[in-house]
Amino acid sequence: MTMDHYLVVHQESQWTISFHGTEQGPFSTKEEAVAAAIAGAQKATQDGMEVEVLVQDVESNFHRAWPEVPSNEPTTPELSTST
């Protein structure tokens, strides 16, 4: 099964969520956007999808925020918005 991603992205002083080509937001804080993305991801997993939430950092790399990575597992490889 393919892993789908909720991407929490910072754009022009606001946060948005991108999932399957649609955007949600804007959110005024990263925390609000991450909470909304996790809620969506949890519902998607209940519907049988395999998803994770990735959050953009200041260098435009993405890091997994949900599900949390157990301390003994390697983290998800970073995704970059650069091509």
Image (spheres, rainbow, N blue to C red):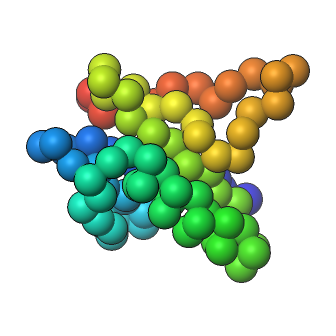
Give percent across and percent down for residue 50: 70, 60
- The residue located at (48%, 63%) in the rendering is 36
Image coords of residue 72 (percent x, y): 87, 21
Looking at the picture, tell me which residue is in the foreground, 56 or 34.
34
The image quadrant of residue 20 is: bottom left
Whether residue 71 is visible: yes
- The residue located at (59%, 66%) in the rendering is 39
Return the x and y of residue 70 as percentages of the image width and height. 82, 30
In the rendered image, which quarter contains the C terminus?
A: top left
Q: Can residue 49 be seen?
A: no
Give the residue drawn at x 52%, y 57%: 35
Q: In which quarter of the image is residue 58?
A: top left
Residue lying furthest bottom in this view? 47
Residue 29 location (% of width, % of height): 33, 48
The quarter of the rendered structure image containing the N terminus is bottom right
Say whether residue 37 is left or right of residue 83.
right
